[in-house]
């Protein structure tokens, strides 16, 4: 296995050590005021931003094909620290990306929700304290009919219309 594959990160390990993190910081700060650590914690681990998308006449359509580096079970990137070196079109989730139009992040994305005046949902791991809650609520790509992008060329035949996109 290449040494740039991350093996240590587990979904729950992202939320186990919250020492030094202000409780409910997302209610007290704007996205632009958050530290890098706070920003990273906001990601709910749904994996939906790692589905391939098509721009069809100015509208973003999600497909049920996923980046080959997404782990469809944990819904985490397998090469997180090296993703921009390895995948040309992997996007950094920054404020510009969150505000980009047409919207290409799912409407359940924590960054998009907060930036649009919504609170985090109960199933968000920061609220529940459990990384698995995003999956149990059916809001991630886990246990859905998704396929790796490897070998797929006809992406238009994989377009999906999930309610949580
Ligand atoms: S869609 Fe948003 S919350 Fe979900 S994995 Fe991507 S960045 Fe994180
Ligand atoms: S490389 Fe980028 S698009 Fe691919 S799984 Fe990792 S974060 Fe998602």
Image: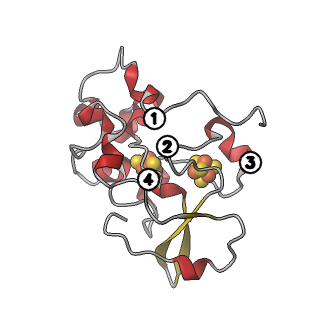
Label 3 beta carbon less than 8 Å to ligand 2: yes
Comes first in the chain, label 4 or label 1: 1
Tell me the element at label 3. Answer: helix
Q: Residue reaching furthest right?
A: 2
Label 4 beta carbon less than 8 Å to ligand 1: no
Q: Which residue is mark 2?
A: 74
Residues under numbered marks 1 and 2 in contact, where contact means CB atoms less than 8 Å apart: yes
Residue 113 place in picture, x, y as percent: 29, 52
**Closer to the observer: label 3 or label 1?**
1
Numbered mark located on residue 142 in the image: 4
Q: How far apart, in angstroms, are the residues tagged by discs 1 and 2?
A: 7 Å
Q: Which residue is mark 1?
A: 11
Comes first in the chain, label 4 or label 3: 3
Q: Which residue is mark 3?
A: 86
Q: Is residue 21 left or right of residue 36?
A: left
Tell me the element at label 2. Answer: loop
Write the residue at 68% across / 72% down. 152
Q: Is residue 73 left or right of residue 32?
A: right
**Closer to the observer: label 2 or label 3?**
2
Comes first in the chain, label 4 or label 2: 2
Write the residue at 61% across / 77% down. 155
Quadrant where the N terminus is found in the figure: top right
Comes first in the chain, label 3 or label 1: 1
Classify 67 as above or below 39. below
Comes first in the chain, label 1 or label 2: 1
Residues under numbered marks 4 and 2 in contact, where contact means CB atoms less than 8 Å apart: yes
Residues under numbered marks 4 and 3 in contact, where contact means CB atoms less than 8 Å apart: no
Write the residue at 41% across / 42% down. 43
């Amino acid at each position: 296995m290449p040494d740039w594959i991350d093996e240590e990160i587990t979904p729950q390990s992202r939320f186990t050590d919250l020492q030094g993190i202000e409780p409910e910081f997302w209610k007290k700060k704007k996205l632009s005021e958050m530290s890098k650590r706070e920003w990273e914690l906001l990601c709910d681990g749904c994996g939906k931003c790692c589905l391939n998308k098509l721009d069809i006449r100015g509208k973003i359509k999600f497909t049920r094909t996923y980046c080959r580096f997404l782990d469809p079970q944990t819904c985490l990137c397998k090469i997180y620290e090296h993703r921009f070196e390895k995948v040309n079109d992997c996007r950094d989730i920054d404020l510009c990306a969150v505000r980009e139009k047409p919207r290409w992040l799912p409407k359940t994305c924590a960054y998009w929700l907060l930036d649009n005046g919504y609170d985090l949902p109960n199933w968000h791991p920061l609220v529940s304290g459990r990384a698995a809650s995003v999956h149990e609520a059916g809001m991630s790509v886990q246990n859905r009919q998704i396929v790796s992008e490897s070998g797929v060329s006809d992406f238009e035949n994989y377009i999906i219309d999930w309610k949580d996109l």
